[in-house]
Each structure stands twice: as C-alpha cells, then as structure tokens.
Amino acid sequence: MSEHRRKPPQPQGGGRAAARRGQTGSSSGRRAAPRSATGSPSDSYDSGGEDRPFGSRAEARRAAQRSSTGGGRRRAADGAGHGGHGGGRRGGPGGPNGPGRGRGREPDPYKKRIIDYPRAGKYGWARWVPSWKLVTGTFIGFCGSLMAVAGIAYAMVGVPDVAAAAKAQNNVYYWANNKPMVSTGGETNRQNIKYEQIPKAMRYAVMSAENKKFETDKGIDPVGIGRALFNMAKGGETQGGSTITQQYVKNAMLNDQSQTMSRKFKELLVSIKVGRTEPKEEVMAGYLNTAYYGRTSYGLQAAARSYFGKDATDLKANECAFLAAVLKGATYYDPAGQTAIDPGATREANTKRATDRTNWILDEMVKDGHLSASERAGYKDLPKLQNPRSSSELGGQIGYLVDLAKGYVINNTDITEEQLRQGGYEIHTTFDKTKVNELEKAVKKVRKENLDEKRRPKTDKHVQFGGASVDPKNGAIVAIYGGESATKHFTNNADETGAAVGSTFKPFVLAAAMQDGKRDPDLGESQAQDERTKVSPDSFYSGKNKLKIKTYDGSIWKNDKGKEWLQTNDDDESYGTPPNYRIDLREAMRVSANSAFVQLGMDVGLDKVKQAAENAGLRESSLTGTTFPSFSIGISDPSAIRMAGSYATFATSGKQNDPFSVKEVEYEGGTVYRHKSQTEQAFTAPVADNVTDVLKTVVEDGTGTSAQLDGREVAGKTGTTDGNKSAWFVGYTPQLSTAVSMYRMDDDETKKSRPFLEMYGTGGQETIHGASFPAEVWHDYMEQALKGEPAKNFPEAEPIGEVVNDIPTPSVTPTPTESEEEQTEPSTEPSETETTPSPSASETCGPFGTFECEDTGGTETGGTDTGGTDGGVTSSPTESEDPGNTRGNGNGGIFG
C-alpha cells in the first residue's frame, strides 16, 4: 500500500478533528496551516490540554462570517497572534511572524464615503434603506436642478405677439379632376380690436365663466395645473390652461399645437411670464382677439359679425354671454349644429347646450356683481342669430361640399378640427363639378316649372329637395344637392333631414327574405331561427287592404298596449286576386303594396330586415322602430347619401362600399391621407341581382316609369310617407346610383321646432309622391350625368329560393269578415287616406311629429300612401318602441 494512503495512528486527543483544531495556527479558517509551516508533524495531532475555541464546524463558520464584517485589519492582527495565518479562510505561512496574507489587506469599510449607500455598518435589508440625510440631500439637489432649468427656460421664452398669432393658412379644396374648387378654412376671418372697443359685458362674461380671479391672479392656477397634470399622468384626456392668461398663451402658440408634456410646460412658463410682465388689459384683449368662436371666426369682432351681423362694440349683455358660451367649443355650442364634424352635435342638442350655458353665465354675472338682476330678468331666450354662412365663395352647393369634405377629414383621418382650422391642407374630393351642376340644374328646373310660392303660398312654400349621387364601384360621392344655397339654407339636405324614406325601404325586406329566408311556423322559436326557407321573388303574399298582421307562427301581432294592427294600402286599395288577394312579391313591389311587405318582414324577422339594411350601407342610428311591423315600409330616415350608397350595393351584385367624399389630403407637399375602399360582400350575387331584377320591373311598368332613361336599364323604387310629408325616388344604373328626396319644412332654422308639413296640393298636384317631382329630378339629372358613357346592362338574375305560399292559407292571407270589420272601432292613429282633408291632433304622431298618440282603444290601422302610386308608411311606433326618437334632422348627418 502506498505510504500516502496508510492510515496514521489515532492520537488520544480526539483524532483528526482535534488535530485540525490544533492550538497553533488555528485561526478562523477551516484548515490549519500545512505541516511545513511548523516543522513538526506531531503538531498537527497535538493532544495538549488547551480548550477548543469553537465547539463545532458550524460555529467556526459563523465566527468566520462575523469576523468578515470586521475586514482585513482585525483578521491580520489575529493572524499575527496565531502563527500569522491571517484573517482569510486560509491562513498564510506559519510562524509567529507570518505575513498575514489573505483578506488581511482589504480596504477599511468604516472609512468615510461621500454617499453612504449601501449603508456601512448595517446588515441585510437595512443596508439598502437610505438615510434621512441621503433622502433630504437628493431632494434638495433635484429641486435645485429643476429650478435652475426652469429659470433658464423662463429667461428664454418670450411674450406672445397677437399679430403673429394670426398666421394660419387657408385649406384648398379640389374637384375630382384636381382643379381647385375653393380656398377656405384658415384664419382669414379675423380682425383685431383694441381693449377699449371690447364691451364691459363681454369681459365680465368671460371672467364669470372661465376665470373669476383674472384681475388679481398671476396668470396661472396652481390647482388647475395640478389637476391637469394628474389627469395627463393617469392617461386621461389632456387639459388646457384654466386661466384666461393660459388660454391666451395657448391660442397664440399656433406653431405648436401638440398635446405633449413639454408643450404644456412651455405654455406654463410663458403664462407665468405674461402674468408678471403684461398688463391685464393687454391679456384680455389678446385672448378675445385670438379665440375661436366657430363659423370660421377668430376674434370677437369677426364673431360678432358672424353671429349677429354687428360690430363688437354694439353687443348686448346676453349676446356677450352667448359668445362666452361658444368659447367652450363651437362644435357643440353653435345652435346651427355641426353634425358634419360630430353626429352628436345636432341643431337641437347644440341649442340646448348653448341656452343652458348662456343662462348660467348670465346668472354668474349677477352673482359676481357684473350684471343687475333686473337686466338679467330681461334675457330669457337665446339672442336671435343670423345664418351661419355669409361668405359669397361658399354660396350655391360649394358650402355643402366643403362641409361634407371637412367632416369626412375630421372623422376619418388623424387630422383634428383644430389642425384643419389652422389651414395649409390640400383636400382632393370626389365631387364631379359637372354632375354637381347638373343635379342642381335638375332641381331648379322642377322648381321653376311647378312651384309658385306667390300663387300657392300655403302649399308651395317651404319646399325642400335633397339629392346625392354615388359611384357604385367604389362608393365615391360624385354629386350632392344640399339646398337652395349654403349661404341661405344651412342644413345639408343630402346629409341630414330626418325625412322618412317610405317604400324605398322595401328592397331591404326582399333582400333579407332571399338571403336569410322566412321562419317555419311549425317549428319552435329557436329551431325556426336556424331552419329557414329562402324566399323566391315569385312567392305569394296577401295584398289585401287592412290586412291583419301576424307573427311568423300565425298569432296576431299586438303592440305593447295589446292592440292589433291592420295594415292599410295605398288609397285603401287591395291588390291581388280575391278573395285572399294573392300577389307575388315582384308584383307587390311593382304596385308598392304595403301589406305584403309588412307580413313578409314579420315572417323573415325584423332583426333580419334591420341587418340587411345595415349590410347594404345604412347606419343603425338612422333606423327607427325596428321592432314595429311598419319598420319594413320605411319609417326610418337615412340620408340621401346613404340611400344612394345602399342601392349601389345592389348595382354591384352585393359588393358594398361606404360612401366617401375625400380621396387624398396633402400637407406641405406630402400625402397625409389616401382613401382606400374596403369592399364587403353584403349579399350574395344571386340575391342582389334578383333585387335589381325586381326593381327593374318598377321602372319598366310600375310606379317608377317616369324615371326611365333612353337606351339604358334602370332599377329603382318610389316612396312616400305618412301625411304626404316626404317623397323619394332612389334608382341606379350599373354606373351610377342616385337618391332624390322632397319634403316641406319651415325655412326659419332659428326655430326650436320645425315640423314637417304636408304636401297636399303642392305644385298644383293633389298629392306628391315619389313618382312625381323626385323621379322627374332623378331622370333629368341622370340623363345628363351619364351623357357620353356607354349603356351597360345589369347581370342576368339567377333563379333563387322557393316559391312560398303558392297555395294561400288563412294564416298568411287572413280575410276579416264583414262583421269583424264593422265591429272594429276607429283608430286614433292617423290613417292618412285621401279622404282626410286636414290632419287632426292625433296626426302629430309618427316620424314627423311627437313620440306618441293618445290611444282610445280599438284596432290600430297602418298608414297609407295618399300619393296614389308608390305605397306609404304607417304610423310610427309609440315612445316605448322608439326610444330616443329625434325627428327633424335626427339622422346625425355626415352621410346619416
């Protein structure tokens, strides 16, 4: 056996462990010094009588760890005293004079440091807790640095120059052929006035509304700033300055309108400097001269002329309070409405907001001692406002086109309203100048030849037309007719009217029946929703007048008051073959039989009809009474733009494109927006082509024959509504889809309520219907708009669906007995028949009046089309069935 593997004899003093714990060289390390350090092997196994310094290895390790915090200096001393083994885990060479190598030479941790972190003399987590001295010193250093930076920044910023603030550019709008249409939109409508020319009432109105302490503050509001910073820090909406000084600074800093923290910091510094260096008179004048009041008006003088047609010096207290209210946001406080920018900024909503805030400001002026209570009592309503447009360059259709394009840019791009106001944009629209002129010319021709306000003021006055023309292949709006002139009639009749569309809604019912199918009355409700029969246009329904409407399972439909519904037809006439008056859907569309399509809608499900209308391109917000049977025959009020766009979906075999009015936007030579059409397959090609085939019948030999074009295939539908208050024609060729509406409404747009008026006797005709003046306008326009373009035919319609109700059953074509009809009490809801010479009080219900009619019992009767040729709509649902009904400009605008 090798020598180095032979076990040595065990000593009496405790064996190897005792040897390792020998007295000589037994410092805190785990191993003793090598034998060569002592010169005697027996030293390692000495069994001397000295006590062991530690009872176990663990104690030795803990002692070593404790001694490590003392550093090398103490260990070095220990090493020298115990054979020079040092303070490390291994000692140095033995001997009483050993050099004490290892960690004996580490730097002293108790030596003073400038920043005592991590903290010396602390153990564990306590080492990482900063001392109060460190925290205080850091805070003072940070604040000092911040103050230094703020001081330098404060010295560098300058006071705004009011004249320099008025430097925004115009926006240039272009026709579809890239030729300039008009330059407008920048800060051109501005005229600065001196402080002395500003009425005291205006100054006090602004202070009472926005900054009561303006005359004594230093230009900033620390509380308001803190609130704004907190809101920004938590990711909320950025807020502007709360004082008049800060608002003035914001208005003057046109070169930077970004909503960033750095910009807010800069505004704060400038506001402080302005508050310390500028007189309050200069600040107030600067604010009122740079503020935006809406209607492209910058500054008080321009606003006074835009809203009241007078100089600022002549403003009354209530007019000043109104302008102070408008400063909160012209989009939502101009009573004229701004639906092109925001569908929620309707005329009604804006008027209410402006009225409430104006009255509040007047009350605050009284509280602040700036207005006497007696003078305040004389101001109850809003001051009388003038037409919102006065610029001659926005006359005719140009103002409507600009509003439409501007609204589209704000709602469909990253460009904000504020940025657009500052100008510099080149906006390339889809509007075809020739087609716009031809549509306007067609309306003027019909007006001149048929309407005479002097001879027939009670019937021919207040007549309005609206129209829109859309390219089916991409949804581009090529032409609109918004009214007589944008400087005379503010509402864009192509985009927002509230006029119900009547029977022009029926194609969506037919499309739903072919696409989704009718429910099977023999199946349970849930199963019937899934197992449906797709309907052929050759299917049969009842065309009987006063048809008792049933749900799909055969039960009589009743409203929320438990009343049954009898659907009437045009002139109380029944269509189809007696006794059950069988009529196929193609024929029902041709003669515009209401009863057939109301029952069809119930069989298919009004939810499916609604979905079909939305798929075609109508907006949900414009669909009214979606749970009411008459929903299927057009009590809803989409805009002319949306109606033209939805019919274009049928023209393209079911491919739907949203209408748009802007192709491209450029800024400083670069493109910042380019439109990309997103085509969706709303209906299958067989469904859309069959709808077109049925609508061709309407024009070829039905209610729409006056819309026939020479040598071209045309598909279209007429529509007339309750009380003869609106009439429509919507039609299309493969290349162009156009909608034309006609209605009567008071021209005074300052009135709070402007109900639709009847058109009995208008234009010398007994009644007005879609086949008359609207179809005539449509025809004259389309003849010229398509001039020079080759005639194209629609795709051939493939057979689709099953012929349902080929054998009529009582559940589908119920025929009330003579005794039943005699027992039916007269309805309190309007029947709108030709025999009604004038409307009763109850006829204020429906889509053109109040929400609800008084119900005295009996069976309800659907409305009829007194126009005589194209169906009509029934009375509107009750309030509970049509919540949020906002008749009269209620479709939200911007292609509502």
Image: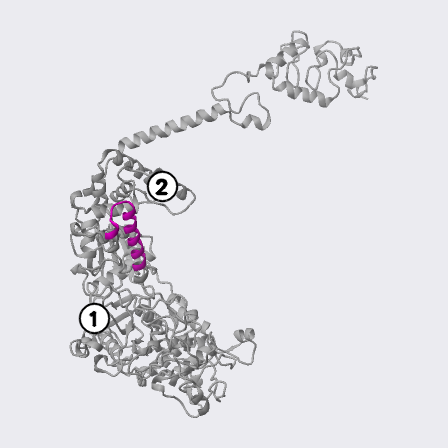
In the image, which residues are magenta?
351-374
What amino acid type is highlighted by mark number 2?
A: Gly
C-alpha gap between disc 1 and disc 2: 52 Å
- Mark 1 vs mark 2: give the one in front: 2
In screen coordinates, is 568 left or right of 217? right
Is residue 120 positioned above or below 704 on the image? above
Q: Nearer the viewer, residue 890 or 654?
A: 890
Determine if the magenta segment contains residue 788: no
Q: Find residue 108 and report its horizontal and vertical position in percent.
A: 55, 16
Q: Residue at x 77, y 16 (%)?
A: 19
Q: Nearer the viewer, residue 661 or 686?
A: 661
Q: Whole-percent x and y of residue 115?
A: 48, 22
Q: Which residue is mark 1?
A: 440
* Main secondary structure of the magenta stretch: helix
Q: Position of residue 324 (x, y in %)?
A: 26, 50
Q: Of label 1 and label 2, which has the lower sequence position?
A: 2
Q: Quadrant of residue 233?
A: top left
Mark 2: give few (<14), some (14-19) or many (20+) Cα within 10 Å. some
Which SS class for mark 2?
A: helix
Direction from residue 348 to residue 58 in the image, left or right: right
Up the image or down, 4 lies above or below 563; here it is: above
Residue that mark 2 sits on: 224
Q: Is residue 352 magenta?
A: yes
Secondary structure at badge 1 equals helix
Report the quarter where the N terminus lies: top right
Query: Residue shown at 27%/32% (left/top)?
Result: 156
What residue is at 31 percent from the left and 71 percent from the top?
Answer: 499
Looking at the picture, does residue 381 appear above or below residue 275? below
Q: Position of residue 556 (x, y in %)?
A: 49, 81
